[in-house]
Amino acid sequence: MSSLNETSKGMRTVIAVLGRRNAGKSSLINALVGFDLAIVSGIPGTTTDPVEKAVELNPLGPCLLIDTAGIDDDSELGPMRVQKTNQALANADIGLLVIGDGKITDYEESLVTALTSQNKPFVVVINKIDLGRYRGVEQTVQDKGWPYVLVSTVDGRGITALKDLLRNQKDVGRLEDPGLLAGLIKPGDVVVLVVPIDTGAPKGRIILPQVQTIRAVLDSHASALVVTEKELAGQMHKLKSPPDLVITDSQAVLEVSQQLPEHVPLTTFSILFSRYKGDLPSLVAGARAIDSLEDGDVVLIAETCTHHPLTDDIGRIKIPRWMRDYTGKELDFQVSPGPAFPKDLREYKLIVQCGGCTITRRSYMNRLQQAQQEQVPITNYGIAISYMQGVLNRTLAPFPELLSLQVG
């Protein structure tokens, strides 16, 4: 059972362990974490599908290790397993390319090509050095200029060096937690969080973005006051001075903005996560496409988590209703549920992405980049709602870097 204190999957560094069958990928994972986490067998192809394992891996911290199927799987289901391995690679932050038989083949070459084309750091792990068959492959890897480490999962040689090499990889700094509230608050500030309790809130709990924001406030040595939209005005009167920041659920943004003086900084959880997980300026720019929608246009509602649709679901019911009312057009809304995302986006005139709290920044950015490549405007739930309700400028005001993106 997951602990409430665990780092969420969406905030972990994702490491894909790649290679051919029987290269020792599962053994490497066990050596990295220090205990038997993955199933190990001498039979090639034991790992048939990518398996995600959340771990604390010093010195990288919270990580998600993905144990992938062998890229050389020639079974009847091989092509589908290889496709899933490639999907895992696309969503990874770092790749570990494991070589266990002392030679480099076209499979390794193709993986390196895929990693470099996606600008992802990687480390070649020359495994099974206890067997002595590694001098030739080591020289080849050196000649190619690939970062590598010699490892034995049997006696532990090279594991510490591998962890250090991972930590020092080029561009790995982009994987560091930038801070959900970085630059917005300082120690001693008071932050008011407006959290509606509606049918979308799990019984006895609040949703993940709100939990993560509370933790970010506390990590900033600031104070969090959590209220519903109905209690906001009364609590504001009790404060000796205005709060330093108010963060609201997007569904209540209009009501909250009407209750707050203009000088009180206001934004939404969704906008915070847009900044944290993705490219906030492009998502803001994408909202403008709402004004150009025409009758019959297809709009994609892109979810990332699996959930039971509610009678007044924000993505499936409320946003389509608000968008039809705002545009006056008869629009066709399609839903992409869970972590899947359409491979072909050309039929869509607009994509409205959820906050993405359950997926990694890499996965979120992959969606944005695919939309940009296919020239399909993309925005997200909270930005679209604030735009349609005429308060987007207000909710972007706490971010000085976005002043040039103020909308009319």
Image: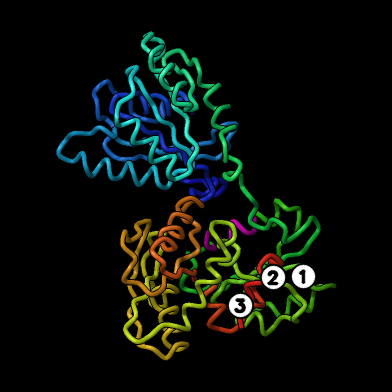
Q: Secondary structure at mark 3?
A: helix
Which stretch is magenta?
Answer: 206-215
Q: Which residue is mark 3?
A: 392
Label 3 and label 2: CA atoms lie apart by 14 Å
Q: Which residue is mark 2?
A: 246
Q: Upstream in the sequence, badge 3 or badge 2? A: 2
Task: Return the mark for residue 243.
Answer: 1
Furthest residue to the left?
76
237 left or right of 109?
Answer: right
Kind of residue at badge 1: Pro
Query: Are dots 3 and 2 in contact, CB under 8 Å?
Result: no
Q: Secondary structure at mark 1?
A: loop
On the image, the x and y values in percent for residue 25 come to 37, 28
Q: Is residue 186 above or below residue 175?
A: below
Kind of residue at badge 3: Leu
117 left or right of 42?
Answer: right
Furthest residue to the top?
132
Picture residue at 45% right of the left edge, 25% below the top: 35
Q: Upstream in the sequence, badge 3 or badge 1? A: 1
Task: Return the mark for residue 131.
Answer: none
On the image, the x and y values in percent for residue 154 come to 41, 14
Picture residue at 38% right of the left edge, 77% below the top: 311
Mark 3 Cα shell of 10 Å, populated few (<14), some (14-19), many (≥20): many
User: Residue 217 is drawn in which quadrant?
Assistant: bottom right
